[in-house]
Amino acid sequence: MLGLRGVGKTVLLNLIREEAEASGIYTLSVEASENQSLPSILAPRLHTVLLKLSRRRAAKELAQRALRGLAGFVRALKVKYRDIEVGLDTDPEPGLADNGNLESDLQELLEAIGAAARADATCVAFFFDELQYVPEEQLEALIIALHRISQRRLPVVMLGAGLPQVRGRMGKAKSYAERLFDFSDIGPLLPEDARLALAKPARGENVEIEPRALDEIVSKTRCYPYFLQEWGKHVWDVAERSPITVSDVEIATRQVVADLDQSFFLVRFDRLSPAEKKYLRAMAQLGEGPHRSGEVAQKLNRLVTSLAPVRSQLINKGMIWSPSHGDTAFTVPMFDEFMRRIMPGDEWLSSI
């Protein structure tokens, strides 16, 4: 079991999933959200996988039993989690994953699925993105179920991806999570790799990029993969001839920043309450960060303790994270610059 967190996580998760599918592994692609329960996310995807397994002669009987377990799981939890909408045409098996307790029911259900996969000499792999949005109680149930699967050596695995706070949230949900999972940080590219990511495909089209232009893009993007893609696209569209120059990058930068402000950044900003916006604006006033929580509180002329709920909400929304105790950092680069653009001057201070 592996937990991924950081920059480029979704891209890497999808690449691994494609490799797994090519090897004959049954995969479930799952993306958590703030407004959906874990059972409602898992149920329809588990149904699809179990239908496939039930068509395999070696696994048919056990897969059908797992389908009956899924039917009981859905029926028992529909009342508690009102967002479960999957329709099943299988009658439940009394006593199998149907007592209405997510922790025990999920264990029993995954054990039944694992038994079916083992009978078919294959594996079921969960590819779970945005893990930070799974509520702590439900995350705990998932960790316990996977721990049980690991103890029984059943072929069910999970590769999870999320923002940097994932490790802390999983450790808080279950203290043994850090022993159960391997956590890998996926940070920005190295500068030389960032340059190569831009220069190599350009050369494939017989286009060169001046070294100073590459340096400028690397500096602007902080080697963040998504931003490299955005700058690469706009620079390509702007440049009229080879080689691509610093002037091309300067023109493209204005376009990229405008596009990011209206999409990538604004989507995040629009999810914030007024208090959360002020907290992030105070962070931005201090610079890129990370910053001590006391520094942010001082900028807002507030006590650290009074701002703890706002900070916690921002962490839950994936806007900030804590690289170390008492420190606070933005989860994506350049968000401090955006906050200063969208809340300019000192007017935001007067509304505190």
Image: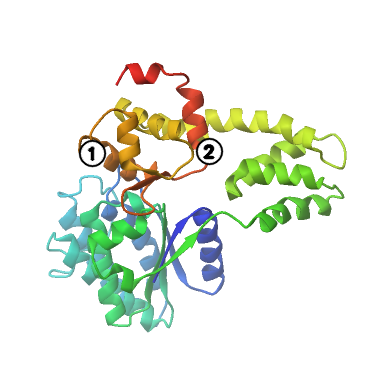
Judge by depth and name the residue closer to the eye, 211 or 315.
211
Judge by depth and name the residue closer to the eye, 335 or 72.
335
Q: State the residue at coordinates (48%, 23%).
A: 342
In the figure, is residue 258 to the left or right of 205?
Answer: left
User: Tag on residue 12?
Assistant: none
Q: State the residue at coordinates (67%, 53%).
A: 194
Amino acid type shown at disc 1: Pro
Q: Which residue is mark 2?
A: 334
Q: Which residue is mark 1?
A: 309
Q: Is residue 335 visible?
A: yes
Q: Residues within 10 Å of mark 2 (few under 14, many from 20)?
A: some
Q: State the residue at coordinates (43%, 83%).
A: 121
Relative vertical location of residue 140 with respect to residue 321 in this rendering, above or below = below
Number of on-image labels: 2
Q: Does the CB distance between marks 2 and 1 fall below 8 Å? A: no
Residue 136, given in percent of the width and then of the height, sits at 24, 54
How far is the residue under mark 2 from the one under mark 1? Answer: 24 Å
Relative vertical location of residue 350 with respect to residue 327 in this rendering, above or below = above
Q: State the residue at coordinates (77%, 52%).
A: 199
Label whose residue precedes the other's in the sequence (2 or 1): 1
Amino acid type shown at disc 2: Met
Residue 50, given in percent of the width and then of the height, sits at 36, 67
